[in-house]
Image (cartoon, rainbow, N blue to C red):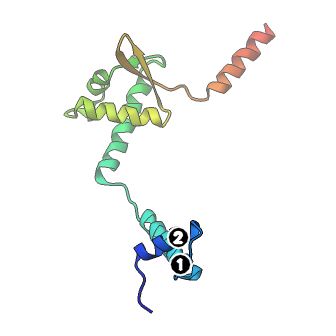
Amino acid sequence: MKKLTKKEIFNAITDKLNGKETTITLEDMLTCIAHEIELLDKKNTNKKPTKAQTENEKYKADIMATFAELADDAKLTVTEVLKTTPSLAGQSTQKVSALCKLLENDGKLIKITEKKVSYYQAAVEDTEEVEDTESTESAED
């Protein structure tokens, strides 16, 4: 028996799912699917961060350190973040904006837009605990 190609296997699987007859056995289909899953798992486990990703993690930590030094309610534009974070010297505002967006996606920064100007602010951690203590205190008064 000749070696089956991926195209032949996938066409046979499609035919089988559509209720059509196929010459390829179900066992061959399952073997192919298992092999493809194994290849995907192997591909995903070998991922290491790239040099740029490693560098970006350092920049993100530096940005968060800058916000930690400021008052809790401090709002900064991307340009201000660039100017107040020494390690970002020489970087573009586009890069800093992308880093801030990643931090926003991670829940570490909050984006505030006022009059078409975007500001970033450090996210408050454990807001539920703060709200619970405030409501408890006001109930006791």
Image point (37%, 37%), residue name: 60
Residue receiving disc 1: 22
Residue 7 place in picture, x, y as percent: 41, 73
Query: Which circle's residue, 1 or 2, is located before the other in the chain?
Result: 2
Image point (53%, 74%), residue name: 34
> Is 94 rendered above or below residue 119?
below
Residue 42 occupies quadrant: bottom left
| Discs 1, 2 touching: Cβ within 8 Å | yes
Image point (53%, 78%), residue name: 22
Residue 69 place in picture, x, y as percent: 41, 24
Q: At numbered mark 1, what does the secondary structure look like: helix, strand or loop?
A: loop
Question: Considering the image in quadrants, where does the C terminus appear?
Answer: top right
Q: Which residue is the extreme one toward the front? A: 20
Residue receiving disc 2: 15
Q: Which residue is the extreme one toward the left? A: 90
Q: At numbered mark 2, what does the secondary structure look like: helix, strand or loop?
A: helix
Q: What amino acid is at disc 1?
A: Thr
Nearest the eye: 42 or 139: 42
Residue 117 occupies quadrant: top left
Q: Would you say 129 lies left or right of 100 here?
A: right
Mark carried by residue 132: none
Query: How far apart are labels 1 and 2 at the CA level?
Result: 7 Å
Residue 135 place in picture, x, y as percent: 73, 15
Nearest the eye: 114 or 67: 114
Residue 41 place in picture, x, y as percent: 48, 67
Nearest the eye: 108 or 67: 108
Q: Residues within 10 Å of mark 1 (few under 14, many from 20)?
A: some
